[in-house]
Image: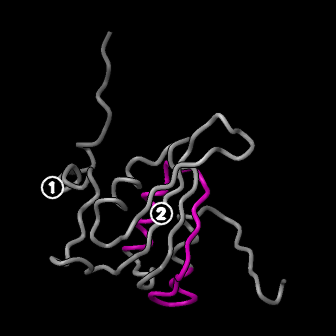
Amino acid sequence: LSHIVEVWIGQVKDLIPRLGEEFGDCNLNMVFMDQRGTTFHDDLSQLEELKLLAPNCRIVADNTVKPGAPVYCWHTTVSDCYDTTNYTLCEFLESTIEDWQVVCDYRGPLAGAAGRRRPMPWQHLREGRKEEDWKAWEVVD
């Protein structure tokens, strides 16, 4: 398969920009996410911002309950840009553990009647803030 498949070593957040550099805008027709679920929303946001998702791109995210991807699930479920189905299934080789797989089709950045893309739930916290606003509070005993 070496004439068909390329393996890129690295973290997803570092490799996503390379997709755009090598293949251009709207080049992804299918995305499968099975890395740490807590980063799904960051990875999806990066794919959206770099305009790498082709219309009707199928995105499948596995293990969205354990370890969990609540922001990703919220975004893909309420955004006008996605047609989403959340499937419940048993964890591989663990019939007593329930997990979810989220399957969505990207409709495009201006999908829906109003053509709106809902912001990520924390976006309002970032606007108008300076870096020093995000520093941790010092705990004094």
The residue furthest top is 141
Q: Which residue bears the numbered disc 1?
A: 128
> What is the secondary structure assignment of the residue under circle 1?
loop
Q: Label 1 vs label 2: CA separation?
A: 23 Å
60 sits to left or right of 92: left
The quarter of the displayed image where residue 123 is located: bottom left
Q: Which residues are magenta?
A: 19-48
The quadrant the C terminus occupies is top left
Write the residue at 18% across / 56% down.
Answer: 127
Give the image location of residue 19, x and y in percent: 55, 81
Give the image location of residue 24, x and y in percent: 49, 90
Write the residue at 53% across / 72% down.
Answer: 16
Say above or below: 32 vs 115. above
Amino acid beneath label 1: Gly
Q: Nearest to the eye among marks 1 and 2: give it.
A: 2
Q: Which residue bears the numbered disc 2?
A: 43
Give the image location of residue 62, x and y in percent: 57, 55
> What is the secondary structure assignment of the residue under circle 2?
helix
Q: Residues within 10 Å of mark 1 (few under 14, many from 20)?
A: few
User: Which numbered disc flags the more N-terminal residue, 1 or 2?
Assistant: 2
Look at the image and say whether residue 22 sits in the magenta stretch.
yes
Amino acid beneath label 2: Asp
Write the residue at 34% across / 59% down.
Answer: 77
77 sits to left or right of 85: left
